[in-house]
């Protein structure tokens, strides 16, 4: 199955859509649907209801309950605002339960903006880590001799995306200094995960490009707070995304080209953790930012619920 099929939706009636295929899991530890698949379906459904001159720049939402892989996703898209500059949509993604009830899985607000003729300022932050040059890219694209024990976490995504991890994940110089104030919390782990990725199949319109961007941007952000602190995910009784914010800074995407991603953990406490991912294109322009808050409970016994 292609990624285009995996994120595709078909109309049922005005404002109502259904995924073309059943959603997929993330990898070996995932019992439920990969959240990025659910988000991608929501983005694609929202795009079907807006004018082509409006472009997604913000998607903020909450996961209400996990989806299962044995049935399709249904989307109800409601128009919240239609102005000269913005179109806003509320998306409710659900699945049919065995008893026929409608089980809400995700609720999100998507905002679309026209192409403005002028900007007061234009700039973009560079990656925190070194970006691979054409001469050194082989170094980054070669897998380590011993595959990471966490590789299987993303096994199902390898069917859809070409992902090349960096060998030398670096540390941030901004966050790892200990605060000397009394009772200050320990610093966030300084590790920054980085990789290159692209879509090996051609994508068509903007809706497909943005849906795939959302699909990838969700990858792993729920896991890195534990992994970056040296914990095995089997030590967690619950590890799942609670809420997310996807910010898109350009609408002219070609995910068939290589893009660079960085991910890092920011803050954790009260069995929750907050993480951030950023994506740059080959020109070094920041394309998107994804932030997520995760439930991360320690396990009282064997096994994890992800």
Image (spheres, rainbow, N blue to C red):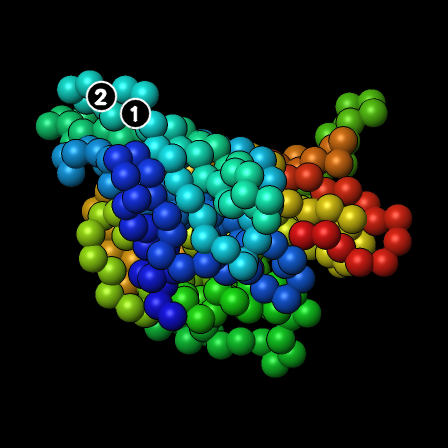
Foreground of the two, 63 or 9: 9
Q: Which residue is mark 2?
A: 82
Total numbered badges shown on the rendered structure: 2
Quadrant assignment, res 148: bottom right
Q: Position of residue 155 (x, y in %)?
A: 55, 69
Question: Which residue of the protein is positioned furthest toward the right in this rendering?
Answer: 300
User: Which residue does the image show at 53% across and 54% down from the upper left?
Assistant: 34
Q: CA distance from mark 2 to mark 1?
A: 7 Å
Q: Residue at x 77, y 42 (%)?
A: 297
Secondary structure category for the residue under label 2: strand
Left or right, 103 with respect to 91, comes to: right
The disc at residue 79 is: 1
Can you see residue 249?
no
Structural crowding at the residue carrying mark 2, measured as other residues with C-alpha within 10 Å and reported as few (<14), some (14–19) or many (≥20): few
User: Would you say residue 80 is visible in this rendering?
Assistant: yes
How far across and down, in percent of the image, does residue 214 sit? 40, 47
């Amino acid at each position: 199955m292609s990624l285009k099929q995996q994120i595709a939706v078909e109309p049922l009636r005005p404002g109502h859509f259904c995924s073309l295929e059943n959603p997929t899991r993330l990898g070996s530890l995932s019992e439920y649907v990969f959240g990025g698949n659910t988000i991608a379906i929501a983005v694609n459904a929202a795009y079907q209801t807006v004018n082509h001159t409006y472009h997604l720049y913000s998607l903020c939402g909450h996961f209400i309950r996990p989806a299962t892989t044995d049935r399709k996703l249904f989307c109800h898209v409601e128009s919240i605002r239609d102005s000269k500059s913005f179109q806003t949509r509320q998306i409710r993604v659900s699945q049919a339960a065995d008893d026929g009830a409608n089980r809400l899985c995700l609720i999100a607000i998507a905002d679309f903006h026209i192409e403005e003729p002028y900007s007061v300022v234009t700039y973009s932050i560079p990656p925190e880590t070194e970006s691979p040059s054409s001469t050194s890219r082989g170094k980054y694209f070669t897998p380590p001799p011993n595959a990471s024990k966490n590789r299987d976490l993303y096994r199902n995504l390898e069917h859809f995306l070409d992902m090349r991890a960096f060998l030398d994940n670096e540390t941030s110089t901004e966050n790892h200094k200990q605060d000397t104030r009394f009772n200050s919390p320990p610093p966030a782990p300084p590790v920054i995960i980085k990789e290159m990725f692209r879509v090996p199949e051609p994508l068509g319109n903007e809706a497909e490009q943005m849906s795939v961007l959302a699909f990838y941007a969700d990858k792993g952000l729920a896991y890195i707070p534990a992994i970056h602190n040296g914990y095995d995910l089997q030590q967690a009784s619950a590890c799942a995304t609670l809420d997310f914010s996807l910010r898109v800074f350009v609408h002219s995407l070609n995910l068939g080209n290589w893009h660079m991603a960085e991910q890092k953990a920011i803050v954790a406490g009260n069995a929750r953790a907050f993480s951030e991912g950023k994506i740059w294109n080959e020109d070094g322009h920041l394309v998107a930012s994804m932030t997520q808050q995760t439930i991360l409970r320690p396990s009282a016994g064997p096994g994890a619920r992800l």
